[in-house]
Amino acid sequence: MVEKVAAARGGHVKLRTVRSVCAVIGIVCWVFAAVLLVHVFLVVAGVSTSYGFAGLVTNWAGAVNLGTSDLFTVGDEALALLMNEGLAALLWLVIGALLTNLISRVVLPVDQRREWYRRDARQ
């Protein structure tokens, strides 16, 4: 990773904006993956969905499971849920990585794709 002073190059606002958008996309994808994994943990632990938090997680997991709820059908319900929602969580992480990489490649010039900037302390 190369660190350069922001004052040395123009366009640091564009770079900061792209990095911020990519960070938001990454955070959203990680949160969706975490919700799916928490839902798997709650089901394996046997928590009733009538409780507020468990019901919220169950509803949210149903909304972000990318249609993988009945992809794997095995004898054990907890194992099937682990496989289905584990795959969805993995897909969310891959989607986030692909989106941020694509945005960086399309919007930023080649020499700015992997650079991190800091402000010059002398300004």
Image: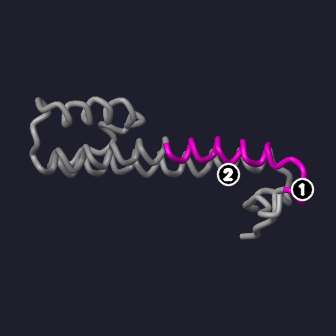
Q: Is residue 69 above or below residue 112?
A: above
- 78 left or right of 121 in image: left
The image quadrant of residue 117 is: bottom right
- 24 left or right of 122 in image: left
- 39 left or right of 49 in image: right
The image quadrant of residue 88 is: top left
Q: Residue 118's x, y, as percent? A: 74, 60
Q: Residue 33's x, y, as percent? A: 40, 47
Neighbor class of circle 1 (other Cα within 10 Å; few <14, some 14-19, many 20+) is few
Looking at the picture, which amino acid does disc 1 mark? Arg
Res. 96 mark: none
Indicate how the structure is coloured in the image.
one colour
The residue under the point 76% across, 62% down is 115
Front residue of 103/83: it is 103
Looking at the picture, which amino acid does disc 2 mark? Asn
The residue under the point 9% across, 45% down is 46
SS at circle 1:
loop
**What number of labels is visible?**
2
Neighbor class of circle 2 (other Cα within 10 Å; few <14, some 14-19, many 20+) is few
- The prevailing secondary structure element of the residues shown in magenta is helix
**Where are the magenta residues, as a range?**
7-27
The residue under the point 39% across, 34% down is 64
Front residue of 76/17: it is 17
- 16 left or right of 33 in image: right
The residue that label 2 is drawn on is 101
